[in-house]
Image (tube, rainbow, N blue to C red):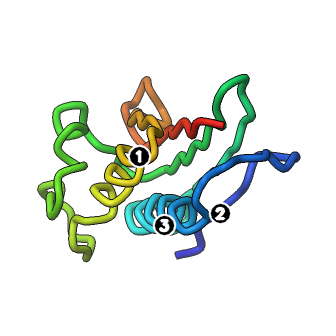
Amino acid sequence: KQIDIGVDSALDVPLMFNPLDLFTLVKNLVDNAIRYTPPGGRIDLSVLAMADAVQLQIKDSGPGISVQEQARVFDPFYRSLGTEEAGSGLGLSIVKAIADRTGARLQLGFTDEVEQRGLCVTVWLAK
């Protein structure tokens, strides 16, 4: 798809978190971003150490998720209407299950707030 994927973080960030949970969470979010980002698009990952948490953010240049659908996309098997992308509708529900089980916090937004395009997923993982 010729997608530009970048990581905006120069430092390692220490975190006490189950490695398999972290891998699964990041993999599902990045897979989702790749799936919905059009050819030639962009995906940016960033990690930021905060006082009591680590912030992980994944931004893409895809269509984003409407505000009305943002709460529903965490439901198992839910798929946004009008999408032609293949998938089971489980990726974000898996991310939500991991977040709920580990005390992580999730927030969905737009990469471009003005145009309301692109998905920005922010995850706060407790240190």
Label located before the other in sequence (3 or 2): 2
Give, as a three-letter code, the residue at label 2. Asp
CB within 8 Å, label 2 to label 1? no
The C terminus: image quadrant: top right
Which residue sits at x=24%, y=49%?
74
The residues bearing labels 2 and 1 have C-alpha atoms spaced at a distance of 27 Å
72 is higher (above) or lower (below) than 84 = above
Image check: 47 left or right of 27? right
Pinpoint residue 18: horizontal percent, then vertical percent. Answer: 58, 59
**Which mark's residue is nearer the viewer, 2 or 1?**
1
Disc 3 designates what residue? Answer: 24
CB within 8 Å, label 3 to label 1? no
**Which mark's residue is nearer the viewer, 3 or 2?**
3
Disc 2 designates what residue? Answer: 4
Disc 1 designates what residue? Answer: 99
Label located before the other in sequence (2 or 1): 2
Label located before the other in sequence (3 or 1): 3
Image check: 112 left or right of 44? left
Pinpoint residue 1: horizontal percent, then vertical percent. Answer: 52, 76
Secondary element at image label 3: helix
User: Camera-side residue: 15 or 76?
Assistant: 15
Which residue sits at x=41%, y=33%?
107
Secondary element at image label 1: helix
Pinpoint residue 95: horizontal percent, then vertical percent. Answer: 38, 55
Which residue sits at x=25%, y=76%?
86
User: Camera-side residue: 103 or 74?
Assistant: 103
Secondary element at image label 2: strand
Image check: 46 left or right of 73? right
Pinpoint residue 68: horizontal percent, then vertical percent. Answer: 17, 33
Give, as a three-letter code, the residue at label 3. Thr
User: Camera-side residue: 7 or 117?
Assistant: 7
